[in-house]
Image: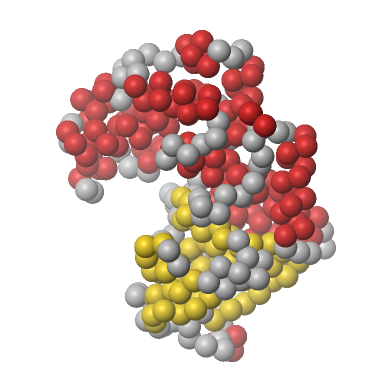
Amino acid sequence: MGDRTLIHALPFAQSRELSTLVENRRAFTLDRLELNIFETYQVSAHVPLRFDDLVMINMIQGKKVMHFEDVKAFDYLPGQMIVLPALVDMHIDFPEATLDRPTQCTALTIHKEKIDAVLNYLNEFYPKEELDQWRIDPDLFHLYNSTELADLVNKLFQIIMSENPLKDVLADLTFKELTIRLLQSQSLLALKIGKSTNKILLHLQEFIQKHISEKISIDLLEKVAHMSKASLTRMFNRELGLSPMEYVIQQRIDKAKKLLLLTRNVKESCFAAGFNDVNYFVRLFKSRVGVTPGAFVLAR
């Protein structure tokens, strides 16, 4: 079974399509959207790149080392996404690219009017809590794909590269859904690193982490948040893209990962992370992480 957080491999360029062995580019253009496929076939360093519009970059195969001004260089690997405003200068190293296994990534460029239309619609009809505005945060530019995010990117790419006569309409609908998932992914990341502007979510996260080994129910979360079940569920679904109890499960899985690396004991990590059945924990961990807790420990 493939990893559903990865973007599907795209057909590589034919020899007749190659104009360069470093960041060879193919483009598929729709209304205010352009899908660029970049392939590099030889080890290279400090290759400059800049886009004129906001861009969502996804690694498909291989490895890059990314260099931005005022940001420490970092490895960029499949399963990750970078979202950048227009006119950001980057320099890229390709330490592993070869003719047989080129480094491949995609760059979806989006015209400002198109992204603004989605943000304005959300802010008018589905506003966030505490009068905060939906926006793409340039500081939260390096993301790890969720299953939902990767599935939508794959779907959008398939539409853009298809011969469907309605692909402009289908791409527009999928792009809107992708943008919402992207915003929710940034909200989750902001909450994780303590930079969320939603004080209720920050308070709930602190409570869940403090009581992670105890029983946590939706009724308890309602009392902690001083909100009704409907309002609490709506806030989580709207801003994070998941239910309150799904968020608790994610927090338990994250805690279990840390405990497994520390104790290397599956049973101990299970109960300390708030699960009360080892068999259930093993099944859930494998479904969410892709490997069993035991295999997770052995791989570290």
Q: Position of residue 127 (x, y in %)?
A: 70, 33
Figure coloring: secondary structure
Task: Name the foreground residue: 187 vs 3.
Answer: 187
* Left or right position of 256 against 66: left
Residue 262 can be seen in this image: yes
Q: Position of residue 108 (x, y in %)?
A: 63, 64
Residue in the image at 45% along x and 67% along y: 69
Task: Name the foreground residue: 259 vs 282.
Answer: 259
In this view, the residue farthest toward the front is 70
Residue in the image at 40% along x and 30% along y: 251
Residue in the image at 42% along x and 15% along y: 216
Q: Quadrant of residue 30?
A: bottom right
Total numbered circles: 0
Residue in the image at 63% along x and 28% along y: 130
As displayed, is residue 169 above or below residue 223? below
As displayed, is residue 39 above or below residue 183? below
Q: Position of residue 269 (x, y in %)?
A: 24, 28
Q: Position of residue 247 (x, y in %)?
A: 48, 29
Residue 275 can be seen in this image: no
As displayed, is residue 226 above or below residue 256? above
